[in-house]
Image: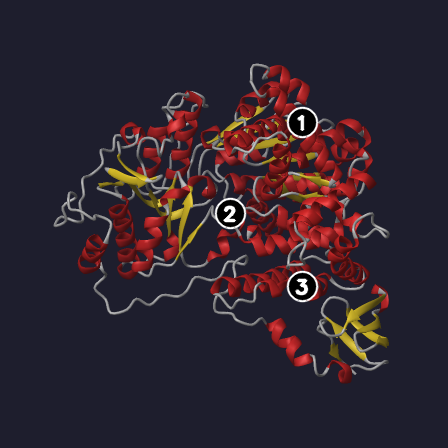
Amino acid sequence: MENILQGLNEEQQQALLQIDGAVLVTAGAGSGKTRLLTHRIAYLISELNVSPYNILAITFTNKASKEMKDRVDKMIDGGDRVWISTFHSMCAKILRMDIDKLGDYDHNFSIYSDQDTDKLFKQICAKYNIDKEDKRKNIVFHINNLKNNNMTMIEYKKMYDYLDNIETIERIYYDYQSELRKANALDFNDLMNVTYQLFKQCPEVLAKYANRFKYVLVDEFQDTNTIQYDLVKMLTSVHKNIFVVGDEDQCIYTWRGANFANIFDFQKDFENVKLFKLERNYRSTKKILNLANLLIKNNKSRMEKNLWTENFDGAEIQTRNVYDEKEEAEVVAREIYDLVQNHGYQYSDFAVLMRLNALTLPFEERFLTYNIPHRIYGGFKFFERAEIKNLISYLRLFTNPRDDISFERIINFPKRGIGDSALNALKIEANNLGESLLNTVLTDNLNLPLSTIKKFESFKNTYLTLKDDYDKMCLTDFVKHLISEFNIKSAYNSNSEEDINRILNIDMFVSQVQDFEEKNESASLVEFLESVSLISDIDGMDSAGNCVTIATVHSVKGLEFRYVFIIGLEEKIFPISRAFDNNDEMEEERRLMYVAITRAKENLMLSSCKTRYLYGKRDYERPSRFLREINLAPAEENIMPEFSVFQNNRYGAQIGAYYKQQYQPKIEKIYYKEPEQNKYDYNPMQTKTKFDEYVENRKTKVESNFEVGQTVLHPKFGVGKIISIDGGKFADIDFGKIGKKSIMLEISPLKVLK
């Protein structure tokens, strides 16, 4: 027991030792809540002999989930058997096993990304002649709001009957859900809503999980929405042992449904709730914490707490009020450059945080000038790139033939001469047959013109061939086979940098599949696609290597950095303009600023501009009210004293030449280690994958290398014996306990043992 409690302060120990019943822990930023949760899990297992099978821990990001799993596994035996996951992953896992009980879906349902759902909404809105983006976004907002609050359309319509477009919202909602069911697909919100429906309609399924989980723990409880909280209450309905950790001061996601009122309601919804406060901060200096406390006390909707630390006072908080965004970027770049070159800092020690993604460009430009490696978060993620989405859509069709969105995306990729007229004709035929688009293509005797049928013929034949191979091959081999048979890389044959990068991304995707397969025994395509769907931007941050992080504040919640720059601290930017007439939104903006401040461990710089070019125009700016609330008057600084702001062509060659002359670092060359590639990014130095080289070397040898009766080694299936060879292409191999597999010789990395 001493080992479990070691490293916990008195308040953490008291919370941990409150075993039974409902426990609410309000934990300030950097107060060690992850440590508390992991130690509590370890205590339950090692000291109270609770089976890992009976413990559920819920987090909000895959990164947090992995971190908790790793910590628990290191502390005790059996920790790897605890169910630790995000809400979305938990619900996806439950639905994979039991969704068929609802009747509308089967186990191989697709999980639609934001891009997929946006495309579906566009198609549906077009039927109602809604083509303006703002009107469509308004409808999408209300549908997501309905789901987040776990309401039926009837309930929602009654509450919002004053809306002029409520009837349209209702029609589109029903059409949207109908199309999802038809496609055997769920959006992110549906993962939780359909799980809730499953529990309500099939009490035996709920009983299975509610009886199983004797102890439920929830991290970041302030970020739960209504449906998530309802699921927690259902899962704890039998044993009623619920342990939640949260901080209403860090609730920054109300715009996507988070309801920090759940923290206050928790004490009403559960009996005899035990409340504990964690106010000791282990992350930041005293000066940084004092600043955070000074700011957040201006919010009314919060529990009273005051963060404190035994850390040293730390450096003074720096402020800068410069002329424009170029000067702002220069100040930051120069500070980073100096600290790395002269004071032992690493690039990864720094984060540049902002309210809006639109502020990144000047920093990108200045960092390139100083040769500062950096990475931007909140941008276009790897699995959202067009070439990767295309590949994912192909794969989805082998697990879910009802997925029309995926079919439409790839049916003319690479080009097959299938235009809108052919696709529309197919849609009419599919509607007449009551089938999906793919299943209609696979139907014999289609009632379509012969010329139209021929356009789909090559796709049909290739799909059926691959469908036969699907069960005969391991996951990685199948993905390689699909890329080859559909000739996907042929779409990028221009030798342009863009096309080369896209091919490299496809190769990187294959490596991701292989990595997943190596880490997950008996990995299936369904499981891989699910893992891809649930990846968030923050999950790849640890693998970014030694580079500066440029990110929105929303993207870095839960992270910490040695030195944080919060830029763009001007009215209408941070806080954002829409919060001016809404006190609730202004309090959320203040919470967002609080989160930004508390990411800093040692140093903090706050910057604002007198004038900023944004959204196509230049405006004079007022410093953010948050700077006034923390009593930090911005220090005047002009790093361009010889340059008059009234000279013409301010952002043309003149200013460029001035910068180059006056502020280029006085060194011959800057040497730095390239940041380690994120696992989801391509390597621009790589022109040929190991697999490509492997196949090229094998193609001429494949027939002569293998013979019936040989013993071979397969990286996934192990040692086996070749039983037969079919035309030099496939070999039937007996892998003993695993059984007989048909292996494609040209692709599969078989090694002859004897």
Q: Amino acid at mark 2?
A: Ile
Q: Neighbour class for label 3 at 10 Å: few (<14), some, many (≥20)? A: some
Q: Secondary structure at mark 1?
A: helix
**Badge 3 or badge 2: first in the primary sequence:** 3
- Could you say where residue 101 lies in the image, as x and y percent from the top left? 82, 35
Foreground of the two, 102 or 739: 102
The residue labelled by disc 3 is: 483
Give how far apart the Cα atoms at labels 3 and 1 are.
45 Å
Q: Neighbour class for label 2 at 10 Å: few (<14), some, many (≥20)? A: some
Give how far apart the Cα atoms at labels 3 and 2 are.
29 Å
Direction from residue 596 to residue 171 in the image, left or right: right
The residue labelled by disc 2 is: 538
> Which label was assigned to residue 233?
1
Foreground mark, 3 or 2, reads 3
Residue 1 at least partly seen: no
Foreground mark, 1 or 2, reads 2
Could you tell me which residue is drawn at 23 percent across and 66 percent down?
Answer: 667
Foreground of the two, 641 or 391: 391
Q: For residue 46, which quarter of the picture?
A: top right
